[in-house]
Image: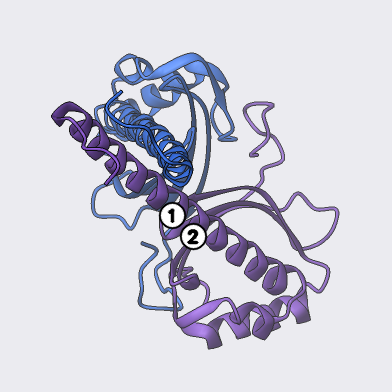
Chain colours: A blue, B purple
Amino acid sequence: MDCVLRPRAAIAATILLALASLGASAASAETQQEANRKAVLAFYEKGLNQKDADGALAYVGDRYVQHNPNAADGPDGFRKFIAFLREKFPNSHSEIKRSFVDGDYVILHVHAVREPGTRGTAIIDIFKLENGKIVEHWDVGQPIPENPANNNTMF
Amino acid sequence: MDCVLRPRAAIAATILLALASLGASAASAETQQEANRKAVLAFYEKGLNQKDADGALAYVGDRYVQHNPNAADGPDGFRKFIAFLREKFPNSHSEIKRSFVDGDYVILHVHAVREPGTRGTAIIDIFKLENGKIVEHWDVGQPIPENPANNNTMF
């Protein structure tokens, strides 16, 4: 050792180490959260826009718990939904307006248009991830009205 | 000085200080985010459940940008909406199922029931805060259907 720390310096070093450990763990959590966001954005683009269900399901883990009341549970329910879009609304497009991350969850605020030129639907999706893979999905959708009570748009 | 750091120790100390600073700023961001979440939960309880618009508006900042297409802009639009609930649906209740925080944003997943005993509506709200006060609101609402395609509920 080149030096011996005085008691107060030792306390300061302990605090510094604790903060450094917090900093390192915050940086690691941040990295995982950003990876989660990227996985959900890729899932959405592959599935909803490219209508490639199996490409999208590469981002899904060992289960896909579906809470959207119009879709059957599991990966097969998702495949059926994408097949429906591909057949009935091949030009449908979902534009992600903003995304949020909180721990294992990613939230998307989406403008979905099934027929180009129509007003479309406002959707907010919630995805839960485990080990970087999507395992659960909730969403809420509302048609965008013709005459809103304010001029701020739904986004 | 009681000691002089060797070059490698100096580099290690610099990294430690950077991590410590990251840790301190992560802890501070966490504190602000939890304060934001508490403000939004209190706003919701005061407004939507207790139907005390002005009590709720105590959590609102210098503006309230409204994106819900059924509500007029600003604090007065919110007052009118709460007055409507108080008059037409005095027993309406909103149960917050989960909440998320990401920086200046708080997201709520809500089960809103206007008439007790009815299925109600699934809602996801997004609030933006500035300096701990709510300044902007988006939401999407969808009636809970009688016969969903899966057994997972909308929550």
On screen, B48 above or below A131?
A: below
Q: Residue furthest front?
A: B2
Q: Nearer the viewer, residue B143 or B9?
A: B9
On screen, B36 above or below A86?
A: below
> Do the dots labelled 2 and 1 sit on one chain?
yes
Q: Residue at x 57, y 21 (%)?
A: A73
- Real-space CA distance between mark 2 and mark 1, rounded to the nearest whole angstrom: 5 Å
Q: Which mark is residue B32?
A: 2
The kind of residue on which mark 1 rests is: Ala
**How far across and how far down the image is residue A155, in percent?**
36, 62
Residue B50's image quarter?
Answer: bottom right
Q: Which mark is residue B152?
A: none
Chain of residue at mark 2: B
Is there CB contact under 8 Å for labels 2 and 1?
A: yes
Q: Residue at x 38, y 39 (%)?
A: A23
Q: Quick one: SS at disc 1?
A: helix
